[in-house]
């Protein structure tokens, strides 16, 4: 099995910063894309940022120039540095990874359990 474990959420004031971390473990042959999604209260889950194995990043427009995604391929980890946080960034943030469990398997999506980020004064 494959597990994704997130950490780093919490309560922060507007304009503050938080860093989310996610570690993938278990039966992993290779990982393709990794990313972060979020689900604001009462809304659907949405893309925040993704990153390829070569480090090419993609961001949703609302977080460009404020958030930075990074990954460590050797450690199977992905991080999200969030700066200049706004109340509308409040959401449960989920880590995502496309994992291949062996050379005989295809890639499939795995998700973390989610971590709450609350931006409020």
Image (tube, rainbow, N blue to C red):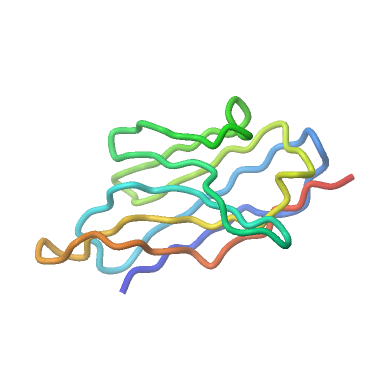
Name which residue lies at 72% across and 54% down.
Answer: 10
Name which residue lies at 44% across and 34% down.
Answer: 58
Q: Name the side, left or right, on which 48 lies relative to 50.
A: right
The answer to whether residue 100 is above or below residue 58 is: below
Res. 28 image quadrant: bottom left
Q: Position of residue 35 (x, y in %)?
A: 44, 47
The answer to whether residue 104 is above or below residue 118 is: below
The answer to whether residue 52 is above or below residue 3 is: above
On the rendered image, what quadrant is the C terminus found in? top right
Residue extending farthest to the bottom is 1
Q: Position of residue 46 (x, y in %)?
A: 56, 51
Q: Position of residue 34 (x, y in %)?
A: 39, 48
Residue extending farthest to the top is 65
Comparing 28 with 67, the one in front is 67
Res. 62 image quadrant: top right
Comparing 35 with 11, the one in front is 35
On the rendered image, what quadrant is the N terminus found in? bottom left
Residue extending farthest to the right is 121
Q: Name the side, left or right, on which 42 lies relative to 105.
A: right
Q: Position of residue 91 (x, y in %)?
A: 68, 55
Number of labelled discs? 0
Name which residue lies at 28% across and 59% down.
Answer: 99
Res. 116 image quadrant: bottom right
Q: Name the side, left or right, on which 65 lies relative to 52.
A: right
Residue extending farthest to the left is 104
């Amino acid at each position: 099995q494959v597990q994704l474990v997130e950490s780093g959420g919490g309560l922060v004031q507007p304009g503050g910063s938080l860093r989310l971390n996610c570690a993938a473990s278990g039966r992993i042959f290779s990982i393709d894309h990794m990313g972060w999604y979020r689900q604001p209260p009462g809304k659907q889950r949405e893309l925040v940022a993704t990153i390829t194995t070569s480090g090419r990043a993609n961001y949703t427009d609302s977080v460009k120039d404020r958030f930075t995604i990074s990954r460590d391929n050797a450690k199977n980890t992905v991080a999200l540095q969030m700066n200049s946080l706004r109340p509308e960034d409040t959401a449960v943030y989920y880590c995502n990874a496309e994992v291949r469990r062996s050379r005989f398997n295809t890639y499939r999506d795995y998700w973390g359990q989610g971590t709450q980020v609350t931006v409020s004064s």
